[in-house]
Amino acid sequence: MDEPIIFDSDPGIGGILATSTALTDPRIDLKLLTTVTADGQIAKATQHSLNLVAFYQRNVPVAGGAAHALIKPYEPQSDVYNNDGTADYEYPDYETAPLPEAAADAMYAALCRSPKPMTLVVTGPYTNLALLLLNHPDCKNKIKRLILLGGALSRGNVNSLADYNVFTDPEAAVAVYQSGLPITMVSLDVNLNALITDDTINQLKQIGPLAESFQALYKKYLRDIPGGVPAYDMHAFAYLLHPEFYTTKKYWIDVQTDGPASGVTVADIRGAYHNGQTNATVCTGVDAKAFNAWFLREVSVIQDIFIH
């Protein structure tokens, strides 16, 4: 792909595998890894990203970012995101250090250095991205597009309607959706409609020892939906590499910031409130079989890098 990438993520099981994909897939030109949390554990999150970079022997800079939302206090949501966000799986600690600047400033520096507009893939709360846009408004002409994990059209995962990433920092999501940049919203709907199936999880053990460790993580911590587990962050990279897997529609997306609907993404499906204008391409459907086949291929690539 002729497309330099900045990957901004929070810790967690999906984050480990997505970061591994970003670091090992030869089609991904990863220029910067940044980290974000909502619970204050940014040092641990950043160390995990540094460990993964060293583990795969890649030369990719890492910058720690926002530890809290712009305004909203943190509300714990799940045991999956425990003290350090990696579901108790331990990579070795390597003696490496993050960049001295915060994530938003590191993003801006990377954008300014790049001879080509960059794509930002964001799979955690949008706080770092909002800080980039608010503090460096001139960055927009250096950004090709945003691929955002989060938002929901039909049902949520922290309450009836809200997705975790938007719910955690709705004010940041407002800043992002009002930016005017090309946005693809990889919605919770496709995550719940294209699970990593039980058959796919069982096949991981056959790939190798590192893949087997991924299998153990998924089986232990993400068993809340019958028939499989959500892939979460991996859908953002599946869309990056294989947009043909996804059905999309263009909508105007608004984000609620207060009251019982705080964190809810509202799609103007009928085009009734914004004169037919749109501000996002929303993933509404996905080929689950193709996604699962791709997922296994990606894990095989990661395993091969691990062996060699």
Image: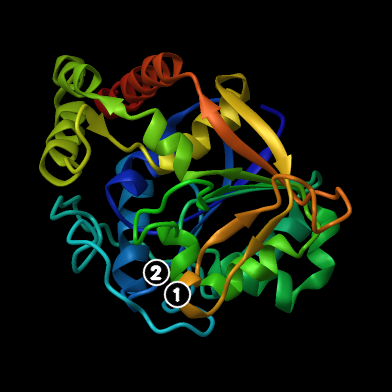
Left-right relation of 188 to 277: left
Q: Residue at x 23, y 62 (%)?
A: 78
Q: Residue 57: in sight, yes or no?
A: no
Residue 37 is marked as 2
Identify the residue position indicated by label 1 in the image: 260
Left-right relation of 169 to 200: right
Numbered disc 2: secondary structure: loop
**Relative to 56, does residue 285 appear above or below in the rendering?**
above
Callout 2: few (<14), some (14-19), or many (20+) C-alpha neighbours within 10 Å?
A: many
Q: Specify the amino acid type for callout 1.
A: Pro
In this orientation, which residue lies closer to the viewer: 80 or 188?
188
Q: Which residue is drawn at 20% across and 50% down?
A: 91
Left-right relation of 120 to 219: right
The quadrant in which the C terminus is found is top left
**Relative to 232, does residue 157 appear above or below in the rendering?**
below
Q: Which residue is drawn at 49% across and 70% down?
A: 261
Numbered disc 1: secondary structure: helix
Residue 81 position by quadrant: bottom left
Q: Specify the amino acid type for callout 2.
A: Thr
Residue 205 position by quadrant: top left
Looking at marks 1 and 2 on the same chain, the residue that comes earlier in the sequence is marked by 2
The quadrant in which the N terminus is found is top right
Q: Position of residue 96 (x, y in %)?
A: 35, 61
Q: Do the residues labelled 1 and 2 touch (CB within 8 Å)?
A: no
Spatial CA distance of label 1 from label 2 is 23 Å
Q: Position of residue 251 (x, y in %)?
A: 72, 45
User: Nearer the observer, disc 1 or disc 2?
Assistant: 1
In this orientation, which residue lies closer to the viewer: 32 or 76?
76
Q: Position of residue 130 (x, y in %)?
A: 64, 70
